[in-house]
Amino acid sequence: MKFSVMRDEIFNALQRVVNVIPQRSTFMMTQNILIFTEDNLLKLIGTDLEITLMSWAPASIKEEGSIAIPGRLIHDIVRELPNIELQFEVDEQFRMKVTSDFGRYKISGVNPIEFPQRPELGEDVQEIVVENKIFRKLIENTIFACSTDELRAALTGVFFNISTGKIEAVATDGHRLAKMGYIHDVTPKKEIMAIIPTRSLNFVLRNLDGEGSSTLHFGKKHALFELADTQLFARLIEETFVDYERVIPKETPYEMKIDTEAFYSSVKRVSLFSNPLTSQVVLNITPKQVELHAEDIDYGGEAQERIPCEFNRDQFRIAFNSRYLQDILRHISSGKLQLRFVRPDYAVLANPLEAAENEEQLMLLMPVRLESE
């Protein structure tokens, strides 16, 4: 195997791939990356067996071939070089020689046959094309609500429900729920329902361009995301997602309208004085204003603020975990939002008042029991 490539070209590909390499692994081959030539391109693959990421770079290929080589070592060597042409040569014992204007470096690799194979999507693969800006918003406005509890595997990813003309993403950890939907020109052969792990989606976000579109392929056990200069295979979570529609209140007699940024800023300030264990912030809502109150009895700290709002009843009192409330407010894509209540111990709905065209957004947050005063 013999090729030459500009430092910046191979480094950009290495940066994408090396991040997939696990810090620790019982399967040492995952500490390597696979480098091979295909379609007149230099291709690189890294995997942790859950995520497999392939990137590529233009190169001058003199001899075809492949090698598995320590990923972080080759990344660190190339990182310290300026943007000059690098010459790579691999011998029959899978030793790689890297030559530059500065000197020569030798790295011991291994037989590429031992490297894990790329996942197979299998038969009956569904394929759709999604605009990058829509795909990004679907992920960013739901992923924060995923659970980190591995015992509830279905909740550790974002549930995608894709039907003709609509894409919907949902995430929940049992305390909060985020749902984002788009009316979009998608036409899958049949309805797609898949749970994609948060770690995979974070890699998608990292490699997703601001403009253009991406192609998504859904198999039975894996999904493939075709991004710019990158292909990402993700193992799907093979669990049944919760029946989230069941927890969304159908009737909400109490409704408050409020400026999103003003409310978010007030919650952030007041929560600094909340009890570190509960992070509780209390809302006392009246027709024209909401009073936010937090107190830490152990340290004697207390905060209270009032901001204007519109409320359709005389009075309502409810408490939230301020961290969860801030997460909800930070991801509301509108200058004004609406909070809808049933009673102080029941799920609360939040939605933007001025949703973008073809966009649907709904958040749900469970309140906390009011501390006795």
Image (spheres, rainbow, N blue to C red):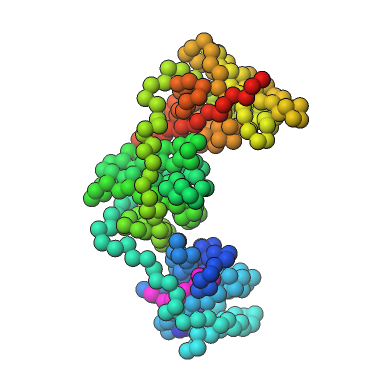
Nearer to us in this view, 240 or 69: 240
Which residue lies at the image location 53% right of the left edge and 13% below the top edge? Answer: 315
Q: Work out whether 309 lies above or below 146.
A: above
Which residue lies at the image location 55% right of the left edge and 35% below the top edge? Answer: 324
> Looking at the magenta stretch, what is its main secondary structure?
strand
Membership of 114 in magenta stretch? no
The x and y percentages for residue 43 are: 44, 71
Nearer to us in this view, 331 or 2: 331
Tell me if residue 249 can be seen. yes
Which residue lies at the image location 28% right of the left edge and 58% below the top edge? Answer: 125
Q: Residue furthest left?
A: 189
Which residue lies at the image location 49% right of the left edge and 51% below the top edge? Answer: 150
Asked which quadrant contains residue 226, the reply is bottom left
Question: In the shown orientation, is residue 97 left or right of residue 195?
Answer: right
Tell me if residue 78 can be seen. no
Q: Work out whether 144 lies above or below 308.
A: below
Question: In the shown orientation, is residue 334 left or right of residue 119?
Answer: right
Q: How many marks?
A: 0
Nearer to us in this view, 87 or 127: 127
Q: Residue furthest bottom?
A: 92
Asked which quadrant contains residue 101, the reply is bottom right
Name the quadrant of the C terminus: top right
The x and y percentages for residue 321 are: 58, 32
The x and y percentages for residue 264 are: 58, 30
Query: What segment carries the magenta color?
Result: 30-38
Name the quadrant of the N terminus: bottom left
Q: Work out whether 356 lies above or below 40.
A: above
Q: Residue furthest right?
A: 299
The x and y percentages for residue 272 are: 68, 32
Q: Work out whether 221 lies above or below 65.
A: above
